Image (spheres, rainbow, N blue to C red):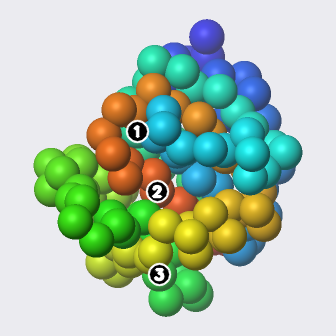
Amino acid sequence: MLKGISPLLSPDLLYELYRMGHGDVVIFADAHFPGESLNPNIVRADGVRIAPLLEAVLPLFVLDTYEEAPVVMMAPVEGDHLDKSVIQAYREALDHFYPKTPPIQHIDRFEFYERTQTCFCVVMTGETAKYGNIMLTKGVTPVE
């Protein structure tokens, strides 16, 4: 364990976040997501829900301020629905660290899958909420 780093963040996840550059995308995928089929760079976070993981990651991760929609979720297919409490939990985590983040954009399932193929990495979580997948675009990390 490291001081100041959440124990939810594995060494593998920290490594991938550190390697990401400006404009790279990380997906935090729910337990239903076919990540292994869509991207070769998979990090496992089994048993961890996405909202607490966002709370752990966002202090270390700058969102892209040049991107119109630096936060994207999968839209439910017609006839299905996304639990509003999932969006609220993600939004609370975002607002805690980046209150000026634009609204979360929702895109079609197959467009989400397509973007997954070119993203930097996919974090497979234990999130059980349907359509709980969220992608974040990394910004420029300030040098202090």
In this picture, is 117 found above or below 51? Answer: below
Please tell me the numbered disc located at residue 50.
1
Give the residue type that dot 3 points to: Ala
Rendered-image quadrant of the N terminus: top right
From the top left corner, tell me how far across and down residue 64 is, in percent: 57, 75
What distance separates the C-alpha of mark 2 from that of mark 1?
A: 9 Å
In this orientation, which residue lies closer to the viewer: 48 or 94?
Answer: 48
From the top left corner, tell me how far across and down residue 52 is, in percent: 36, 33
Residue beneath the point at 21% across and 59% down = 81
From the top left corner, tell me how far across and down residue 42 is, in percent: 74, 38
Kindly identify which residue carries mark 3.
69
Give the residue type that dot 2 points to: Ile
Contact (CB < 8 A) between labels 2 and 1?
yes
Residue beneath the point at 76% across and 62% down = 117
Query: Would residue 56 appear left or right of 91 to someone viewing this image?
Result: right
Q: Secondary structure at mark 3?
A: loop
Which mark sits nearer the N-terminus, 2 or 3? 3
Crowd around label 1: few <14 · some 14–19 · many ≥20 (10 Å)? many
Q: Of all residues shown, which one is farthest toward the top? A: 1
In this orientation, which residue lies closer to the viewer: 78 or 123?
Answer: 78
Kindly identify which residue carries mark 2.
134
In this picture, is 82 found above or below 48? Answer: below
From the top left corner, tell me how far across and down residue 115 is, in percent: 67, 70
Give the residue type that dot 1 points to: Ile
Which mark sits nearer the N-terminus, 2 or 1? 1
